[in-house]
Amino acid sequence: MIRDYFRLVFFAASLLVGVQVPNIIDQYEKRVDAHLTEATENLAGFQNTANEFFAGNLETLIKHYQQSEDPVIRRDAESLDQIYQRTRNFQAEQIALQQPWYRVIIHLVFNRNEVLFTETLRAYTYNVPLNQQAIAWGVATGFTLTLVCELVLMLLFRLLTPRSRQKNNASKKSFSLFR
């Protein structure tokens, strides 16, 4: 009976963790969009200059600034290049988040922007969204984690139980969360 309660509590906790996955992705996407908007706005004046004098090519404008005789302009080239690279990184991140759900998960696990992901987790607000995607994630996570826990416990039980005792108790049920 205790095992049944443990199993239910573990499944419920796993379900609640799984329900959070789409919400974390959503908040991460919003953070990427906000940073991209900010970086694009910071770049707008330079983009206008590049449009007017360099056929819209910001890289050519940056090179022009870097080759300038004026040290102030050369220093601005560094700042401009940082803003430009930051904008490109956010654009790449946004493109990665527009892929199918499984690619988004792979991206967030292996290739995410650590700074943005950390910001997202620090500002994360837990909630329980009741949409189809969240429910699917919750049930899948709950089932998977409960199954893994069950298999690990069964393996440990078999490894820690002496062989002679296992043979004598062969007719009895072995430890299992799922009966």
Image (cartoon, rainbow, N blue to C red):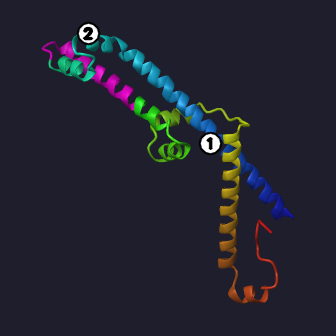
Question: Does the segment drawn in magenta span residue 82?
Answer: yes
Q: Nearer the viewer, mark 1 or mark 2?
A: 2
Please state the total of marks drawn on the protein image.
Answer: 2
Identify residue for label 1.
21
- Classify mark 1: residues with Cα within 10 Å, few (<14), some (14-19) or many (20+): some
Position of 30 compared to 13: left or right? left
Q: Earlier in the sequence, mark 1 or mark 2?
A: 1
**Residue sitting at x 69%, y 62%:** 147
**Residue sitting at x 49%, y 39%:** 99
Q: Is residue 14 above or below residue 30?
A: below
Name which residue type carries label 1.
Val
Task: Decide whether the magenta segment is chiefly helix, strand or loop.
Answer: helix
Give the magenta range.
Answer: 68-89
Identify residue for label 2.
52
Asked if one can make out residue 17 in the rendered structure from this viewpoint, the answer is no
| Viewer-proximal residue among 60 and 117 | 60
| Viewer-proximal residue among 102 and 143 | 102
**Residue sitting at x 70%, y 59%:** 146
Name which residue type carries label 2.
Glu
- Classify mark 2: residues with Cα within 10 Å, few (<14), some (14-19) or many (20+): few
